[in-house]
């Protein structure tokens, strides 16, 4: 019964079928409630660990978390690396524009 963070991958049961889901929101840290997104795109609100469920919740909620799988690394796509000299030129252009020194 681990505290989950955004981006964690877990196996959750939805209507009796286990599937991998990603944590997209932590709704309540104290009660360990999470919002999960299944691979199909279905969002499961108010999901908690199976061991935390009491008898009242077991009857009303068709989903729960079974186990922690891992963490999804965010994809960082770097198209062009910015050179410091290019950045300095653009900053100087902006300063000149603010001062009113730019002429067309």
Image (tube, rainbow, N blue to C red):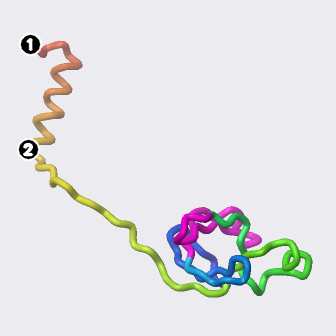
Q: Residue 40: percent from the left, percent from the top?
A: 54, 69
In magenta stretch: residue 30: yes
Question: Which residue shows up at 79% across the image and 82% down it?
Answer: 52
Residue marked by disc 2: 85
SS at mark 1 in the image: loop
SS at mark 2 in the image: helix
Left/right of residue 38 with respect to residue 82 in the rendered view:
right
Residue 35 against residue 96 in the figure, above or below: below
Residue marked by disc 1: 104
Q: Quadrant of residue 21?
A: bottom right
Question: Which residue shows up at 9% across the image and 12% down it?
Answer: 103
Q: Nearer the viewer, residue 44 or 71?
A: 44
> Disc 1 or 2, which lies upstream in sequence?
2
Residue 11 against residue 39 in the figure, above or below: below
Please identify the quadrant where the C terminus is shown.
top left
Count residues near mark 2 (Cα–Cα under 10 Å), then give few for <14, some for 14-19, many for 20+.
few
Residue 83 against residue 21 in the figure, above or below: above
Q: Residue 30: percent from the left, percent from the top?
A: 74, 70
The span shown in magenta is: 21-42
- Distance, label 1 to label 2, CA atoms, is 23 Å
Q: Residue 24: percent from the left, percent from the top?
A: 56, 64
């Amino acid at each position: 019964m681990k505290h989950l963070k955004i981006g964690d991958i877990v196996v959750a049961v939805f209507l009796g079928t286990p599937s991998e889901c990603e944590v997209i929101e932590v709704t309540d840290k104290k009660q360990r409630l999470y919002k999960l997104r299944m691979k199909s795109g279905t969002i499961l609100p108010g999901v908690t660990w199976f061991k935390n469920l009491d008898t009242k919740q077991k009857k009303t909620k068709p989903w729960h978390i079974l186990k922690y799988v891992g963490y999804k690394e965010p994809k960082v796509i770097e198209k062009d690396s910015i050179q410091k000299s290019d950045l300095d030129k653009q900053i100087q252009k902006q300063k000149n524009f603010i001062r009113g020194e730019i002429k067309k």
